[in-house]
Image (cartoon, rainbow, N blue to C red):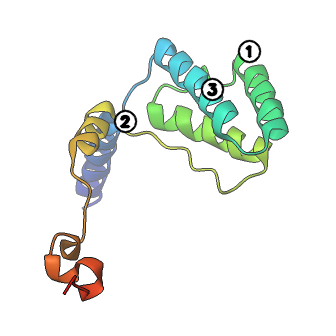
Amino acid sequence: MKKTLLLIIILLTGYISLLAQPVSQREKEEIFTRTKKLFGDAYYFSQTAISTIAFLDKQWKAGKYKPFITVDDFLAALGADLKNTARDNHLNFFHVPALEAANKASEQPAVPWFFFNDKFSNNGLTDS
């Protein structure tokens, strides 16, 4: 029984590690650069954005993000630093794989059926 349980745990651990997407140093640099740019351009509190970006640069130069070998681990560390430094728990930082993002971009937005039904246009008022 113990051997079977141990075998199942080992197989599951191996399977889960196969799901982890590896990240190269070049990809980390691209993600890091784009994150800083988007955060600097879009964050409402510009002074906080400047100080947060400076902190992230300092962490990058110190090599804090080098040990992370999967996208999820790298983004978790970068996102935690982003939230903690900006002191903003409303920040959401996540990764959408390119294929999934392309599929979502091509989808039609969900529009309620009554927007296409003439009976419901103009709240039922007519010209007559």
First-in-chain label (2 vs 3): 2
- Looking at the rendered image, the disc whose residue lies closer to the viewer, 3 or 1, is 3
Q: Where is residue 33 shown, x and y percent of the image?
A: 59, 20
List the residue tagged with mark 2: 20
45 w.r.t. 89: above or below: above
Amino acid on which the number 2 mark rests in the picture: Ala
Residue depicted at 16% across the width and 83% down the height: 119
Q: Where is residue 82 shown, x and y percent of the image?
A: 69, 40
Dot 3 surroundings within 10 Å: few (below 14), some, or many (20 or more)? Answer: few
List the residue tagged with mark 1: 61
Q: Where is residue 71 shown, x and y percent of the image?
A: 46, 32
Q: CA distance from mark 2 to mark 3?
A: 26 Å
Q: Check whether the beta carbons of the residues at disc 3 and disc 1 lie within 8 A of each other.
A: no
First-in-chain label (3 vs 1): 3
Q: Is residue 67 visible?
A: no
- What kind of element bears circle 2? loop
Dot 1 surroundings within 10 Å: few (below 14), some, or many (20 or more)? Answer: few
Q: CA distance from mark 3 to mark 1?
A: 17 Å
List the residue tagged with mark 3: 37
54 w.r.t. 85: above or below: above
- What kind of element bears circle 1? helix
Give the side of residue 61 with respect to residue 94, left or right: right
**Quadrant containing the C terminus in the rendered view:** bottom left
Residue depicted at 69% across the width and 56% down the height: 89
Amino acid on which the number 1 mark rests in the picture: Lys
Relative depth, front residue between 1 and 125? 125
Relative depth, front residue between 13 and 5? 13
Residue depicted at 47% across the width and 18% down the height: 27
- What kind of element bears circle 3? helix
The image quadrant of residue 78 is top right
Q: Check whether the beta carbons of the residues at disc 2 and disc 1 lie within 8 A of each other.
A: no
Q: CA distance from mark 2 to mark 1?
A: 25 Å
